Amino acid sequence: MCLIIDVNIAPQIFPEVKLPDFKPIYDAISKKRARLVYGGQLTKEYEKLHIFWEYLDELDRAGKTRQVPDEEVDSKTQELNTAGRCMSNDAHIIALALIGKVRLLCSSDEDLEKDFTNRELLNPRGKVFKYKRHSKLIWEHCKGVSGG
């Protein structure tokens, strides 16, 4: 549907941009050109980031997010963990991408990046936004999102 923001980056973007490289992500979500997708274990991780969690509630109410049912993500996560194919400890992110049909991730986790771009786990493979110069990825993966 659009993009996933890993918990390791979320506080760097919302409620205010702390690193200039992530301003395109902030702007795209704020202006409804992109939608933040979350669910499953990622929801629980977000809850622990109190300031971000409060802002996420605002994003939800403004129609700038999409929550994928936790049960579906958790079931797929368990399946991925059982198969043992992920290099990272973030099978829940791969599960969310699969269930939510999301192929854009904002993260600084190198092992997760390898998993997210692995065609054997995600086909078509995902892309990872890490720098401002990756802004074109937002346009490529978030077409038709505006307007809620």
Image (spheres, grey):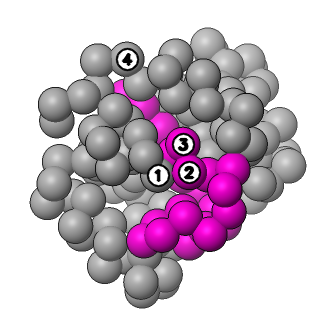
Residue 80 is a magenta residue:
no
Amino acid identity at mark 2: Lys
Give the vertical position of 54 relative to 56 (above or below).
below
Task: Locate residue 15 relative to residue 92 in the image: left or right.
Answer: left
Q: Where is residue 105 in the image (x, y as percent from the top left)?
A: 60, 40
Q: Label 4 sits on what residue type?
A: Lys
Q: Which of 120 and 52 is in front in this view?
A: 52
Task: Kindly report the distance in space between the C-alpha atoms of the residues bearing marks 4 and 2.
Answer: 19 Å
Q: Mark 4 points at which residue?
A: 143
Question: Do the CB atoms of the residues marked 2 and 3 lie less than 8 Å apart?
Answer: yes
Is there a contact, CB below 8 Å, between mark 1 and mark 3?
yes
Name the element at disc 3: helix
Disc 4 from disc 3: Cα separation: 15 Å
Which residue does the image show at 40% across and 52% down from the upper left? 38
- Disc 1 to disc 4, C-alpha distance: 16 Å
In this orientation, does residue 68 appear? no
Seen at 41% across and 40% down, the residue is 28
Q: Name the residue under label 2.
A: 23
Tell me the residue that label 3 is attached to: 24
Sequence-earlier tag: 4 or 3: 3
Q: Read off the magenta span.
A: 1-25
Q: Residue furthest front?
A: 20
Image vertical order of residue 136 relative to residue 78, above or below:
above
Q: Mark 1 points at which residue?
A: 26
Residue 20 inside the magenta-drawn segment: yes
